[in-house]
Structure formats: C-alpha cells, structure tokens
Amino acid sequence: MSVAQLPDGHLQELFASFQGEGATVGARTVFVRMAGCALRCRYCDTPKALVRTEFAEFHRPEGIERCRNPCGLAAVAAAVDQLDLQRRCWVSFTGGEPLEQAPFLAALAPLLRPRRLHLETAGVNAPEMALLAAHVDHVAFDLKLDSVAQEGDRTADHRSFLVACRGTERVAKMIVGPTTDVAEVGRLAKLVAEESPSIPLILQPETPRTGGFPELPLALLEACHAAAERHLRDVRVIPQTHKFLRLP
C-alpha cells in the first residue's frame, strides 16, 4: 500500500490511564478513542465521541495538544509511543464505535506491537469485526439490553458478531440498571452460551451521569446474575472503577 493509500482516522482523544471496567480492569492502558458512532444508547458516558469533530485531543507528557482530524497512522503511533516508551501497556481501541473505522485500526495495529491490543465495541458490526479480528488480542463487546440501552433488539447483530470475532479472547458485557428486564438478560446470555458457555460475562451496573453510586437494587442485580449464570460459567459484577477513582 502506498503512502497515498494509507487510511486516516478520526479520533476524539488519546490518553494514558488505568482500565476502569471489564475483565482487564486495573491494567495500565493507552486509550485510542475513535470518534463517531451510529448508536445512541441511553446510558452512553462518552457523548463527545458520538460524532466526528475537527480536532482530537492528544494527551502528551507535556500537556494536551489539539490535533486536526483526520489523523495519520504515524502520528497516532508516535503519540502512543510517547505515553508508553517501554511498550508494556495495553492499547484500547474505544469510542464512539471503533469498528466504524476498522481499516484504519487494522493498519495501525502492527505499528503498536508488541503491546496487547484491546477492542471495546458495541458488538453489532460483524463485517468490520471480521476485518479487524486478526489484528487484536482481546475483544470486549456489549450485549445491548433494549430495556436499558433503548436501541432496539440487537440479537441478530450480536449473533453475527460472535462468529466474526472467533479466534480472539472474547468478553461480553451488559450494562444493567433499574429498568433491566431480567428475562432479556437470560435470553442474551443464552445467545452467548450457544457460541461458547466459557465466554465471561461482565454485569456492569449503570453509573449515573450526574455522578455518585449506581442506583441498582441488590435484588435486581442478584436476579440478573442468576439469569445469566444459568447459561454461562463465568458471570461477574464489575462497576466502572475509574468513576470512583476519578480517572479519565
């Protein structure tokens, strides 16, 4: 591929912190947050990343730099290197919806090795996942509960996605809140189990946008866990720890 053919990417921000949620919680991570997402989940906590903007914020050791979008591969790889000189951190492709820019990430991934590469996704973009699957190590995908996300029935999308990400380390996640339909939890857990009952499932209590603690009755959380555990071997409850620690 010639230089002229190399894809560019639209980012919202790039920064280093600790992974705040999911199965890799606590790991030192450089986050490459892509801009743009076709979904509008009710609980979205990164609304700035839903649309593409003129500038992205690159956090550098000396401060924040506003970089014009779209960003080139070399510039993004160099910015990651600045934040992780020893190449020991995880790199998380997040968003927005990173799979909407899968060709860019597939071209970027080799420049970031030997780091482990993590993908955070809504789990509804199967063709794009098939393109990126060989380039990432770990995929954390949402199971969109319509009772919470209010994004409609995404069962067919999730089923196709599970096939597309075979060969990667897979972890499913559900955002659960006061409006959660327990039967829906069980139905989507069964869907994952039909692919593989050993795929871990993270139940993530919804964090209020206004801050504070998740407002989820314990009885409802226990019912969600029991419904999922009927189908999957590894079901865990992990909140967004970075919100409690006030990390980016």
Image (cartoon, rainbow, N blue to C red):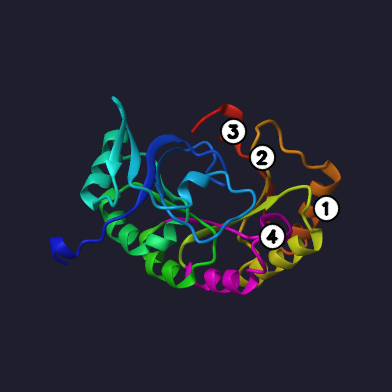
- Label disc, if present, on residue 209 of the rendered structure: none
Residue at 38% across, 48% down = 53
- Label disc, if present, on residue 145 of the rendered structure: 4
Mark positioned earlier in the residue sequence (1 or 3): 1
Q: Give, as a three-letter code, the residue at label 4.
A: Leu
Label 1–label 4 contact, CB within 8 A: no
Instruction: Tell whether 202 sits left or right of 6.
Output: right
CA–CA distance between discs 1 and 2? Answer: 19 Å
- Label disc, if present, on residue 207 of the rendered structure: 2
Mark positioned earlier in the residue sequence (2 or 3): 2
Mark positioned earlier in the residue sequence (1 or 4): 4
Report the residue marked by disc 1. Answer: 223
Q: In which quarter of the image is residue 40?
A: bottom right
Label 1–label 3 contact, CB within 8 A: no
- Label disc, if present, on residue 243 of the rendered structure: 3
Element type where label 4 sits in the image: loop
> Looking at the picture, does residue 115 appear above or below residue 137?
above
Q: Give, as a three-letter code, the residue at label 3.
A: Lys
**Magenta highlight range:** 137-166
Q: Give, as a three-letter code, the residue at label 2.
A: Thr
Mark positioned earlier in the residue sequence (4 or 2): 4
Element type where label 2 sits in the image: loop
**Horizontal and vertical percent position of residue 220:** 83, 48
Q: Give, as a three-letter code, the residue at label 1.
A: Ala
Residue at 21% across, 61% down = 6
Q: In which quarter of the image is residue 15?
A: top left
